[in-house]
Image (cartoon, rainbow, N blue to C red):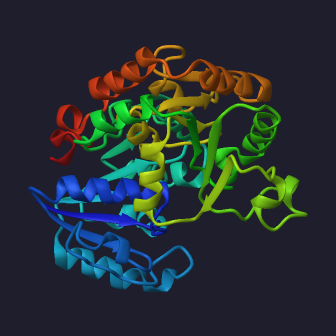
Amino acid sequence: MKILLATSSVTPNAGIPSFNRELCRLLNVENEMHLLVDENIESYRGYAKIYSITGINIYNFEDASELLNKLQVENYDVIINSNSHIMSLLAAFVDDKTRLITVSHSLGTMDCDNAAFNNEYIDNIIALSSSCKDYISHRFGIKNNDKIKVVFNSVADNPEAEAMKKSKMAADKVKIVFAGGSAASKSPDLVVPIVHKLCKTDLPFEFYWLGITTPPLKKFQPFDDIRQVLPEDERVIVAGLIPQQKAAEIIASCNVFLAPSRREGFPMALLEAMRIGCIPVVSDFKIANQEIIRNGINGYVIPHKDVKAFVDRLSDIVKNGLSKRMVKAGINYYEFKYREADFGPYPKGLMY
């Protein structure tokens, strides 16, 4: 089949582009994959045949006729809209012979709403979690539940996972990683006090802060870098925005994946961490994390406003060592539900 993936998300290390690249990698095996992106497409090279129309976005609508003409000439079998603003607007003009599928990302945001806009012209909406499906159905009044399909993400197996797990279990100190940077949806305002309280102890740990360090929240506005509100402690390492491969290496070396996000689609970083034996600690917001983590079985779910509970849980892990049962349960749960080999990201039935 000839498939077009349309997106407005191009930042190399962000969640939606990571999702897009994984999707292209899987679908490109048996199909001819094209890309429609707004601007820089370098991070997608090698994942699909490059097809780019620059400047086609919600702020440059005058070029829409050119896009529609090219879509008609290319005669795609399937168009997948993964957070493309312009494709959401043009859904009504896509040829009836072309199957239009949209992907709903990050629950309760424009990333999610883009997928359901003009839904009467869409064949299927992919919700990355059950909570996402419920939100779309309620917000847009979609009565036909068959139109919205819940399709969990998956990530490829890591052949070094077992060796990584053994190495981490034998480490002298517990390493904790927070990979959300200072994006408001990742709850940096919660992570900062957690780190401060941890640093008031003499526990042997290392805490890694990955991602952007420019604070977006009003609470942090007097400061221009997150380092200014974190404790000066050798146990706290702020890596900042680093290449994806380097970030993956740091996460692979860590024992605990701290993810108290307010909003998520279906976080691939969390699955990747579970795959290599990281114990996830997440908040109890009603998002996909609660569909991945079973409290006390394959990770921990903490009330989102309870800083003390987060600190107590992390301290307990550091003091008492890693639970082999917990690490094994996390990996087994990942293998049961989210292995690419068992569940790929898009059932072929949706494509026809």
Q: Reply above or below: 54 against 256.
A: below
From the top left corner, tell me how far across and down residue 164 is, in percent. 35, 38
So how many labels did they put on this image? Answer: 0
Q: Residue furthest front?
A: 172
Q: Residue at x 38, y 30 (%)?
A: 145
Residue 148 in view, yes or no: no
Residue sitting at the far right: 222
Where is residue 127, by image quadrant?
Answer: top left
Res. 241 visible in picture: yes
Q: Is residue 286 above or below residue 296?
A: below
Residue in the picture at 76% in, 49% down: 233
Residue 227 on image: x %, y %:
76, 59
What is the x, y in percent for residue 281? 58, 29
Residue drawn where x is 48% and y is 34% of the image = 171
Q: x%, y% of residue 6?
A: 35, 66
Using the image, determine if residue 90 lies above or below residue 174: below
Q: Nearer the viewer, residue 285 or 347?
A: 285
Locate residue 32 relative to residue 14 in the image: left or right.
Answer: left
Residue nearest the observer in this picture, 106 or 96: 106
**Viewed as shown, does residue 323 lie left or right of 176?**
left
Quarter of the image where one finds residue 80: bottom left
The answer to whether residue 185 is above or below residue 171 is: below
- Find residue 1 and report its image quarter: bottom left
